[in-house]
Amino acid sequence: MSKKLVWIVPLVIILAILGYAGMKYRQYSAEWRQFDAARQKIDSIVSPGSGYNWAPGVLSAVGEIQLATRNITDAQLTELVTELKPVTSLVILDLSGNPLTDASATHLSQLQYLQQLNLRGTQFSDAGIEQLKAALLNCEVTR
C-alpha cells in the first residue's frame, strides 16, 4: 500500500495545481473578453483608432484606458461608463484634454474600482473634482 501512496500523493498534488491553474485561466479569459468587448464599444462610441490601451498585470488583469484629447463629450461619457461599469479590471482611466464638465461626475462616480482618474485639461470645476473624490474614495483624481 505504501508504494501506491508514494505516487498517488504527488499525482493528487499535481492535479490540484492543474485544477487551480485552469480556474485562473478561465477567470483571466473572462476578464479579457469583458474588457475587449468594452474596448470595441468604446471605439464605436468615440471614433475608430481612439487610442485605448490594455496591459496585463503580473498577478491579475489590470486595465488602463487612454482616451486623452479625443473630444469626448458628457453625452458620450455616459455611454462609455455604461460599457465600462462591469469591467472591474479597469483601474486607470485617462480622460485628459476632453471637453468634459461637472455633469460627468455622477457617471464617473459609478466606476468604484478605479484607482487613477486623470481629468487634466477638462472643464471640471473644483466642486466637480471634490464630488468625484468624495465618491471614489480609493481613486487618485488628478486635474
Image (tube, rainbow, N blue to C red):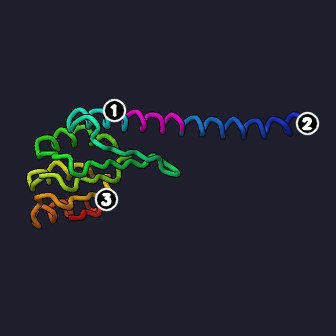
Q: Badges 1 and 2: C-beta atoms under 8 Å apart?
A: no
Residue 76 drawn at (x, y percent): 15, 41
Q: Quadrant of residue 40?
A: top left
123 or 115: which is nearer to us? 123
Check whether the beta carbons of the residues at disc 3 and disc 2 lie within 8 A of each other: no
Three-letter amino acid code at the position of disc 1: Ala
The residue located at (21%, 38%) in the rendering is: 46
Of residues 52 and 135, the one drawn nearer to the viewer in this rendering: 52
Relative height, residue 107 to residue 132 (above, below): above
Real-space CA distance between mark 1 and mark 2, rounded to the nearest whole angstrom: 52 Å
Query: Which residue lies under the disc numbered 3?
Result: 116
Query: For the residue labelled by badge 2, is the local secondary structure a helix, a strand or a loop?
Result: helix
The answer to if 43 sits in the magenta stretch is no
Magenta region: which residues? 25-34
Q: For marks 3 and 2, give the CA distance.
A: 56 Å
Q: Closest to the observer: 73 or 97?
A: 97
Amino acid on which disc 2 is placed: Lys
Q: Nearer the viewer, residue 120 or 82?
A: 120
> Residue 108 location, x and y as percent?
20, 51
Identity of the residue drawn at 17% across and 44% down: 77
Q: Is residue 91 left or right of residue 106?
A: right
Q: What residue would you read off at disc 1?
A: 37
Hey, which quadrant is residue 140 in on the image? Answer: bottom left
Give the crowd class for mark 3: few <14, some 14-19, many >=20 residues within 10 Å.
some
In the rendered view of the protein, which quadrant contains the C terminus?
bottom left
Q: Position of residue 41 (x, y in %)?
A: 27, 33
